[in-house]
Image: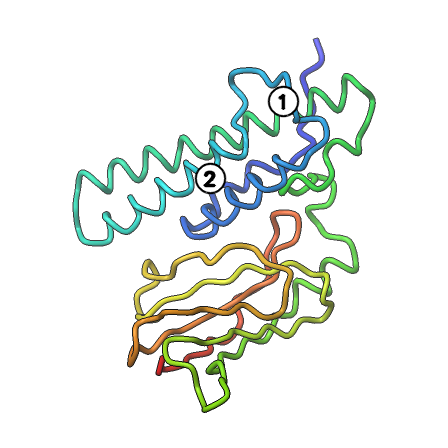
Amino acid sequence: MSSIPELLAVTNLNELSINDFIALLLTVADKTDLHPALKEGLPEYFSGGEKLREMAGNLRQLRDAAATGNREAKAEKMAAWEAGKLAVAMNAQHLTMLSLHRKDPSLLNNIGLELKQRQQGGKSSVNVLAETPVVTAKHVQGPSGPVSGSIVVVISRAKNTIPFEMQMTDDPSNESSWSSQGIHQKSRIEYQELEPAKRLYFRVRYHIDGKTSQWSPTANIIVL
């Protein structure tokens, strides 16, 4: 009996850091909400966008708690991490079966996961992912000067249509302190009502079909 082919690259989930996996969960959640074949009638084992975002939020909290040395939180973090991987893998299997049943490979496009036959990368994807975006942070200027507590983060990319992931921290030496700021396509992201006198650090990377570039050099700014 023939087995179901593995059309989506889910075996590399174990290679992702916890921050990368949280970002992947959020990307897959957004793509799931928009997928035309996933609007209704989903099986009970399938995790919709809301559920995936809930998993990402819970995993982020457990990651932060575990970073304090809490052993119970570390165990819960690992369990939640594995549960998230299983959810992504089950979603991928469902979409694979649906694609095969309908004889429609396009159902596997734009779902936040890489197609297995593309793992070596097409020429354009490889070229883009070999580069990194450039991030800068500036104070927001008002009529009478810088606006207190407000900054704008500006991202320069090879192409304005390339999505990127952004992270922020106030302690760049602590890898677990970097918090996801989501996946974006706009080039300017503004923050308001930040804590004055605090130095913040930002980094970005391209995020294409579940595949990422290296992190950019960090940009930092002291909030006024």
Residue wearing tag 2: 53
Query: Which percent across, then down, holds residue 53?
Result: 46, 39
Viewport quadrant of the C terminus: bottom left
In the figure, is residue 151 to the left or right of 211?
A: left
Query: Which percent across, then down, holds residue 17?
Result: 43, 51
Residue extending farthest right: 103
Query: Which percent across, then down, holds residue 164?
Result: 60, 60
Q: Which mark is residue 94?
A: 1
Evaluate if marks 1 and 2 touch, with contact meaning CB atoms under 8 Å apart. Answer: no
Along the viewing direction, whichever of 122 and 197 lies nearer the viewer: 197
Instruction: State the image quarter where residue 11 is shown.
Output: top right
Query: Which percent across, then down, holds residue 70?
Result: 16, 46
Judge whether 123 appears above or below 74 on screen: below
Q: Amino acid at mark 1?
A: His
Q: Amino acid at mark 2?
A: Arg
Question: Crowdedness of circle 2 by 10 Å Cα count: few (<14), some, many (20+)?
Answer: many
